[in-house]
Image: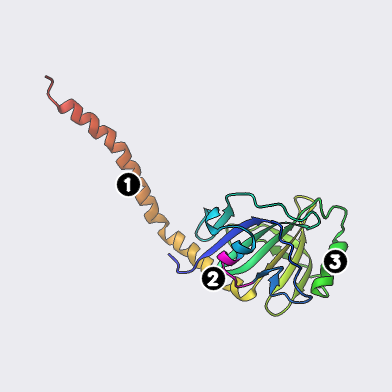
Amino acid sequence: MIGTLVLVILISWAGLSAPLICAQDLSAYRQFQFGMNLPAVAKQSDLKPTEARMIHHRPAVEWRPERTLGSRPKKDPVKEVLFSFYNGELFRMVINYDQHTTEGLTSDDMVEAISAKYGIATRPATKIVFSSFHVYNDSERVIARWENSQYPFNLFRSSYQPAFGMVVFSKRLDALARLAIIEAIRLDEQEAPQREIEHQNREAEKTALPREGRARDQSEPST
């Protein structure tokens, strides 16, 4: 098993009224700083780490809260945030905007509003993958990007519903996470034959037990 840990936690936006990051400061989204750990993120979100449940592991470990968090401010466009951690450090966030709050806004409207905080955007002809994990390969076309040498912020519009979202990550930690996931997939494939043998042995044992019980009953002398 690899010595690194990659996990994801989905948190519904819960009354987080802190201001957005300063213009052109891409090292954090609101009060969530890249590199902070899960307890710190959970504290900022009013969520105990123990209230998250693991729903997937190796090559990705995914966590979701067991309860619905408090209501968010009515005018806050953010609906929920998916946090990804590598070796205990926050390295990626997928922000989903509430479609009702942003209803009527065009892509240009969103770009203009976000540019007021992050500076001038570029319009790359590319797509962004939601997750570093190979088990999740959904992607969307990037509407606009705000980027420096360490962090890209990618605005997209969902193909499935009239809603916007943003994928932001640390380039350094994202690259390390991808390498760890590739190694985890390799190990999974390498260990697959042995796991199949162990599974077949367990099934054979389950089948053999009732037969052995019937054989003992038949061999006992009647009284």
Mark 2: few/some/many CA within 10 Å (<14, 14-19, 20+): few
Residue type for callout 3: Ala
Cα–Cα span, label 1 and label 2: 33 Å
Counting every numbered tag in the picture gives: 3
- Front tag of 2 and 3: 3
- Nearer-N-terminus badge (1/3): 3
- Residue at the image position 39 percent from the left and 55 percent from the top: 193
Element under label 2? helix
Task: Kindly identify which residue carries mark 2.
Answer: 179
Task: Kindly identify which residue carries mark 3.
Answer: 113
Instruction: Tell me if 49 is positioned left or right of 83 in this view.
Output: left
The quadrant the N terminus occupies is bottom left
Instruction: Tell me if 20 is positioned left or right of 85 in this view.
Output: right
Q: What residue range appears in magenta?
A: 34-40
x, y percentage for residue 64?
A: 58, 54
Element under label 1? helix
For residue 201, which numbered disc appears in the image? 1
Classify residue 14 by image quadrant.
bottom right
Mark 1: few/some/many CA within 10 Å (<14, 14-19, 20+): few
Instruction: Tell me if 169 is positioned left or right of 147 in this view.
Output: left
**Front in this rendered view, residue 70 or 34:** 70
Classify residue 219 by image quadrant.
top left
Can residue 132 be spotted in the picture? no
- Residue at the image position 81 percent from the left and 71 percent from the top: 117
Q: Residue furthest top?
A: 223
- Residue at the image position 79 percent from the left and 73 percent from the top: 118
Residue type for callout 1: Asn
Can residue 79 be spotted in the picture? yes
- Front tag of 1 and 3: 3
Residue type for callout 2: Leu
